[in-house]
Image (cartoon, helix red, strand yellow):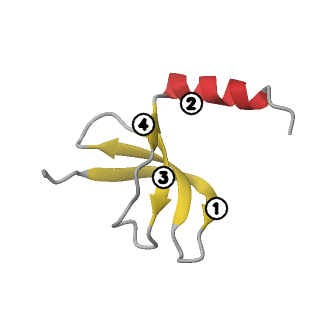
């Protein structure tokens, strides 16, 4: 399996933290030297190990925001 290169351009915040210290974060990440995208996934405290996550373009993040704003919580 080839190495995956990533650069966390900006961290927006932590959504949750597990009892093992992993944090689900919203970040802006450049994957393999491509344009940065918005990314939600769990990270270890050193940002070396990660779980599978979801990566969104700016347009997709805006659409998600609009959908979330419609939910009555």
Residue under circle 4? 37
Considering only vertical position in the picture, is 47 above or below 2?
below
Helix, strand or loop status at disc 2: helix
| Quarter holding residue 34 | top left
Please state which of the two labelled residues, at mark 2 or mark 1, is closer to the viewer: 1
Mark 1: few/some/many CA within 10 Å (<14, 14-19, 20+): few
Question: Which SS class for mark 4?
Answer: strand
User: Mark 4 or mark 1: which comes first in sequence?
Assistant: 1
* Residue at the image point whose x is 47% and y is 44% from the top: 39
Q: Earlier in the sequence, mark 4 or mark 2?
A: 4
Q: Earlier in the sequence, mark 2 or mark 1?
A: 1
Q: Mark number for residue 8?
A: none
Q: Secondary structure at mark 3?
A: strand
Which residue occupies 61% across, 67% down? Answer: 17
Residue nearer the viewer, 28 or 68: 68
Label 2 to label 1, Cα distance in Å? 19 Å
**Residue drawn 55% across the image and 58% down it:** 24
Residue 35 picture quarter? top left
Residue beneath disc 1: 16
Do the numbered discs 2 and 1 sit on residues whose CB atoms are within 8 Å? no
Name the outermost residue toward the right.
72
Q: Is residue 20 above or below residue 30?
A: below
In front: label 4 or label 1: 1
The image shows residue 53 at horizontal and vertical percentages of 44, 47
Identify which residue is drawn at 40% across, 72% down.
46
Dot 3: few (<14), some (14–19), or many (≥20) neighbours within 10 Å? Answer: some
Q: Is residue 23 left or right of residue 7?
A: right
Residue at the spot of label 3: 41
Measured along the vertical axis of the image, is residue 4 above or below residue 44? above
Label 2: which residue?
Answer: 61
């Amino acid at each position: 399996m080839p190495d995956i290169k990533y650069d966390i351009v900006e961290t927006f915040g932590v959504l949750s933290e597990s009892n093992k210290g992993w944090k689900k974060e919203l970040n802006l990440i450049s994957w393999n030297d491509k344009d940065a995208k918005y990314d939600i996934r769990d990270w270890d405290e050193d940002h070396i190990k990660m779980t599978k996550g979801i990566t969104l373009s700016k347009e997709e993040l805006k659409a998600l925001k609009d959908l979330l704003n419609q939910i009555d919580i």
